[in-house]
């Protein structure tokens, strides 16, 4: 499952005019207004009086941003919490499944982020908490009370991971006091 914002690794999509302008800039040329309109006419770049010559930036591997993936996981976790709070174990299992699929996407697309071993932390911290919730939600006739403790374990795992990655300022809650979704979570 690919996240829509993840895009194609290493690929920057440009209009043809933008591509011409970028190519000219990288070759040390300044495109004139015709180049900006998609024509290939360029002029030599001249440094500003007394200023240094412009040099292209070294190519770097584009960073896949983790925040959109985590934002989607947060939305799924909130729906999971609302389902569990309503005692709807079938819907809770659905959002649990979707959350685990999102984890797979994160592990594939952003296994490491700014020196943090994201994929490893998911395996070591998140999955055990989600496994406990999966077991509780699979129990025949599971109630909101049956799901509350394992759900709190999932939320605690999220927050412990945030602390471990120096993002302790991001604090996840069950958020069951309000339902911002146009959805009924009762069974």
Image (spheres, rainbow, N blue to C red):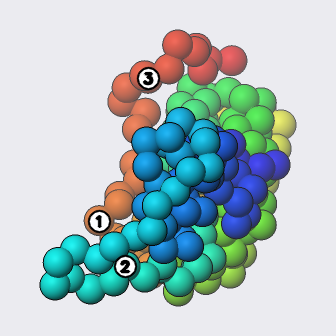
- Graded by Cα atoms within 10 Å as few (under 14), some (14 to 19) or many (20 or more), the crowding at tag 2 reads some
Which quadrant would the C terminus be assigned to in this image? top right
The reply to whether discs 2 and 1 touch (Cβ–Cβ < 8 Å) is no
Tell me the number on the disc at residue 169: 1
Tell me the number on the disc at residue 179: 3
Q: Secondary structure at mark 2?
A: loop
The reply to whether discs 3 and 2 touch (Cβ–Cβ < 8 Å) is no
- Graded by Cα atoms within 10 Å as few (under 14), some (14 to 19) or many (20 or more), the crowding at tag 1 reads few
| Residue 52, percent from left and from top | 26, 86
Structural distance between the alpha carbons of marks 2 and 1: 39 Å
108 or 169, which is in the foreground?
A: 108
9 or 23, which is in the foreground?
A: 23
Q: Secondary structure at mark 1?
A: loop
| Residue 112, percent from left and from top | 62, 78
33 or 3, which is in the foreground?
A: 33
Q: Secondary structure at mark 3?
A: loop
Mark 2 sits on what residue?
54
Residue at left offset 77%, top offset 60%: 104
Tell me the number on the disc at residue 77: none
Residue at left offset 56%, top offset 51%: 41
| Residue 116, percent from left and from top | 54, 83
Structural distance between the alpha carbons of marks 3 and 2: 53 Å
| Residue 19, percent from left and from top | 62, 52
46 or 86, which is in the foreground?
A: 46
Structural distance between the alpha carbons of marks 1 and 3: 23 Å
Residue at left offset 57%, top offset 34%: 79
Asked if 10 appears above or below 148 in the picture, the reply is below
Q: Earlier in the sequence, mark 3 or mark 2?
A: 2
Q: Quadrant of residue 126?
A: bottom right
Instruction: Examine the rendering and report whether any part of residue 89 can be seen.
Output: no
- Graded by Cα atoms within 10 Å as few (under 14), some (14 to 19) or many (20 or more), the crowding at tag 3 reads few
């Amino acid at each position: 499952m690919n996240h829509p914002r993840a895009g194609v690794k290493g690929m920057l999509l440009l209009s043809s005019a933008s591509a011409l302008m970028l190519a000219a800039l990288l070759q040390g040329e300044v495109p004139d207004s015709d180049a900006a309109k998609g024509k290939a006419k360029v002029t030599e770049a001249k440094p500003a009086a007394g200023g240094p010559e412009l040099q292209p930036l070294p190519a770097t591997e584009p960073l896949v941003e983790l925040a959109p993936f985590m934002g989607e996981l947060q939305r799924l976790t909130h729906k999971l919490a609302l389902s569990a709070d309503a005692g709807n174990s079938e819907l809770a299992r659905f959002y649990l499944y979707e959350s685990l699929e999102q984890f797979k996407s994160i592990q594939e697309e952003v296994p490491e982020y700014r020196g943090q071993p994201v994929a490893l932390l998911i395996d070591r911290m998140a999955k055990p908490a989600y496994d406990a919730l999966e077991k509780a939600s699979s129990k025949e006739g599971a109630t909101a009370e049956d799901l509350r403790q394992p759900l709190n374990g999932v939320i605690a795992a999220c927050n412990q991971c945030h602390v471990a990655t120096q993002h302790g300022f991001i604090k996840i809650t069950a958020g069951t006091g309000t339902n911002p979704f146009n959805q009924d979570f009762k069974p």
